[in-house]
Image (tube, helix red, strand yellow):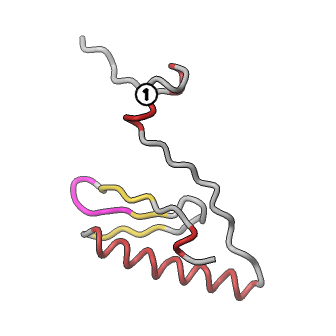
Amino acid sequence: MGLDDYKVLLYRNEPEGWVAEIPAIEGCYALMSTREEVLTELGQVFEMIAAEYRDKGASLPVDTTEMVHAQRSRGRFPPSRCWRAPEPV
């Protein structure tokens, strides 16, 4: 399996910087200043972890990650599973 077989979660790390992670692989994440840097770093982290798995004779985990776009999913989940902003006082 290669990096293209996994979903990558990319998000801002406030107040500055970016985080990229592969949720299916424990410890496979990177933090950098720009999107380009963080994706490059994540590729290097992935290769390092993949090499560790190969050295142990193990297979990388299968990606079973499901991505849900929060704005598009509103109304599809029971209210107990949806985050709601607190009511103003």
Which residue appears at 39% of the width and 24% of the height? Answer: 84
Residue at the extreme right of the image, as rendered = 57
Nearer to me, 4 or 21: 4
Which residue appears at 49% of the width and 78% of the height? Answer: 45
Question: Residue 63 magenta-drawn?
Answer: no
Quadrant into which the C terminus falls = top left
Residue 72, image x and y in percent?
40, 35
Q: Is residue 72 above or below residue 64?
A: above
Q: Residues within 10 Å of mark 1 (few under 14, many from 20)?
A: few
Q: Is residue 57 above or below residue 8?
A: below
Q: Is residue 30 above or below residue 69?
A: below
Quarter of the view holding residue 40 = bottom left
Nearer to me, 3 or 15: 3
Mark 1 element type: loop
Q: Which residues are magenta?
A: 14-19
Q: Main secondary structure of the magenta part?
A: loop
Amino acid under label 1?
Answer: Arg
Q: How many marks?
A: 1
Which residue appears at 60% of the width and 65% of the height? Answer: 25
Quarter of the view holding residue 42 = bottom left
Residue 1, image x and y in percent?
64, 77
Residue 77, image x and y in percent?
53, 26
State the residue position of label 1.
74
Nearer to me, 26 or 71: 71
Residue 19, image x and y in percent?
37, 62
